């Protein structure tokens, strides 16, 4: 009887180790696939960054022009009001 219990315990330990090894292999595969997808995403984000790099200087130029226009709008509005009052 004692030999049977020892044998069953050893079989149970081997079975637990086999199940753990199986799931560790599955997790490893999943992490590998995730790594592949992240590499593709990183490549895409870098491509977008490269293509959008010219936007920054253009926005600064547009903002400077808009600041100039905003400064002139007050004078234009005053002249338009004066013309409207005289008519």
Image (cartoon, rainbow, N blue to C red):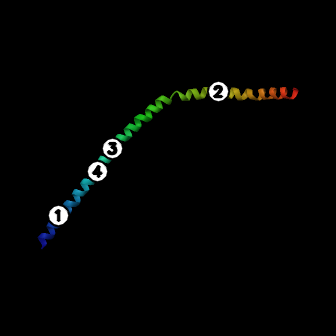
Q: Which residue is mark 2?
A: 64
Helix or strand or loop: what does disc 2 sit on? helix
The reply to whether callout 1 and callout 4 are in contact (CB within 8 Å) is no
The reply to whether callout 4 and callout 2 are in contact (CB within 8 Å) is no
- Label of residue 10 in the image: 1
Q: Quadrant of the N terminus?
A: bottom left
For marks 2 and 3, the one nearer the N-term is 3
Q: Which residue is mark 3?
A: 33
Helix or strand or loop: what does disc 4 sit on? helix
Callout in the foreground (2, 3)? 3
Question: Does 47 appear above or below 29?
Answer: above
For marks 1 and 3, the one nearer the N-term is 1
The reply to whether callout 3 and callout 4 are in contact (CB within 8 Å) is no
Q: Nearer the viewer, residue 78 or 6?
A: 78
Q: Specify whether 74 is left or right of 58.
A: right
For marks 3 and 4, the one nearer the N-term is 4
Q: 10 Å neighbourhood of mark 2: few (<14), some, or many (≥20)?
A: few
Q: How many marks?
A: 4
For marks 1 and 4, the one nearer the N-term is 1
Q: Position of residue 15 (x, y in %)?
A: 20, 60
Q: Specify whether 52 is left or right of 75.
A: left
Say which quarter of the image contains residue 2.
bottom left
- Label of residue 65 in the image: none
* Picture residue at 69% right of the left edge, 26% below the top: 68
Q: Position of residue 31 (x, y in %)?
A: 33, 46
Q: Which residue is mark 4?
A: 26
Q: 10 Å neighbourhood of mark 1: few (<14), some, or many (≥20)?
A: few
């Amino acid at each position: 009887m004692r030999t049977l219990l020892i044998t069953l315990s050893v079989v149970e330990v081997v079975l637990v180790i086999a199940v753990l090894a199986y799931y560790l292999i599955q997790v490893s595969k999943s992490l590998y696939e995730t790594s592949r997808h992240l590499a593709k995403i990183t490549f895409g984000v870098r491509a977008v960054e490269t293509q959008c790099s010219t936007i920054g200087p253009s926005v600064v130029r547009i903002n400077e022009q808009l600041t100039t226009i905003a400064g002139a709008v007050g004078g234009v509005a005053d002249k338009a009001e004066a013309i409207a009052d005289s008519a």
